[in-house]
Amino acid sequence: MSNNGYDPLGQSYGLELRLDTAYEGIDKVWPEGVEKLPLRGKWYTKDDMKALIDAERQPWKKLRAAKAVIRQFSIDKKGHKETAGQLLDDLKVTMSSQHGAESEQLVSMGFKPRRKRRPLTSQQAADANEKRQKTRKERGVMGRKQRAALKFEGDVTVRVAPDGSAEIVPAPSSPPPPASETQDPAT
């Protein structure tokens, strides 16, 4: 595996970078022929000192790994939400078919049972009907018979002006043919 300079967990900086540098550099600067060196009144071997440095840098490594997991989750979150939502929807349908859509057992799984709709009182029904009629009038909604009554029967003439505007003019209806004077209806 080649290292192209990219660390999948991110780049260390600050105190973590200093600890990494000390950990890697201790092999280069450890004096030849010396087994132990003092540090704050205690004597440490090279391996002990590396272990001491490594113990101090591990919390930063764990934190960076946790951030990488969170970053990856935030990238994958949309897909997880879709599949989790679909799973819960399917589970609700399955459990509703087993126990009934109105069953209180669905509550134990976190689903709301379907409730029967309370019938409207006579006053509420009258108010709803009045509101429906008012809305239909405001929006200009018409029924099938009302739309049929609006149909135009006859011929129209469309005049298009040179500027492209159009004018629709109803054609004059032809008058009924005049009654013949030579014919006598009585005969």
Image (tube, rainbow, N blue to C red):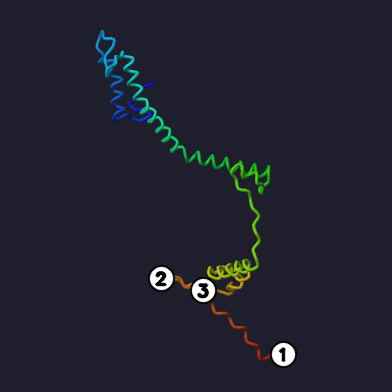
- The quadrant in which the C terminus is found is bottom right
Type of the residue with mark 1:
Pro
Residue at the image position 60 percent from the left and 48 percent from the top: 112
Mark 1 Cα-neighbour bin, 10 Å: few <14, some 14–19, many ≥20: few
In three-dimensional space, the C-alpha distance between marks 3 and 2, rounded to whole angstroms, equals 16 Å
Residue type, label 3: Thr
The location of residue 23, given as percent across then percent down, is: 31, 20
Residue type (three-letter) at the residue carrying disc 2:
Pro
The part of the image, by quadrant, that contains residue 184 is: bottom right
Does residue 25 sit above or below 129 in this rendering? above
Residue at the outermost front position: 41
Give left or right: position of 4 versus 127: left
Instruction: Say the numbered circle drawn on residue 18.
Output: none
User: Residue 171 sits in which quadrant?
Assistant: bottom right
Q: Are marks 3 and 2 in contact (CB under 8 Å)?
A: no
Which is more toward the observer, 43 or 157?
43
Label disc, if present, on residue 185 of the rendered structure: 1
Locate residue 97: give its quadrant.
top right
Q: Secondary structure at mark 2?
A: loop
* Residue carrying label 2: 162
**3 or 2: tag closer to the N-terminus:** 3
Residue 108 appears at what percent x and percent y?
61, 42
Q: Secondary structure at mark 1?
A: loop
Question: Which of marks 3 and 1 precedes in the sequence?
Answer: 3
- Which residue corresponds to the image point at 63% horizontal and 70% vertical from the top-left? 145
User: Which dot marks residue 157?
Assistant: 3
Q: Nearer the viewer, mark 1 or mark 2?
A: 2
- Against 164, residue 55 (above or below) is above
Residue 6 vs residue 16, the one in the foreground: 16
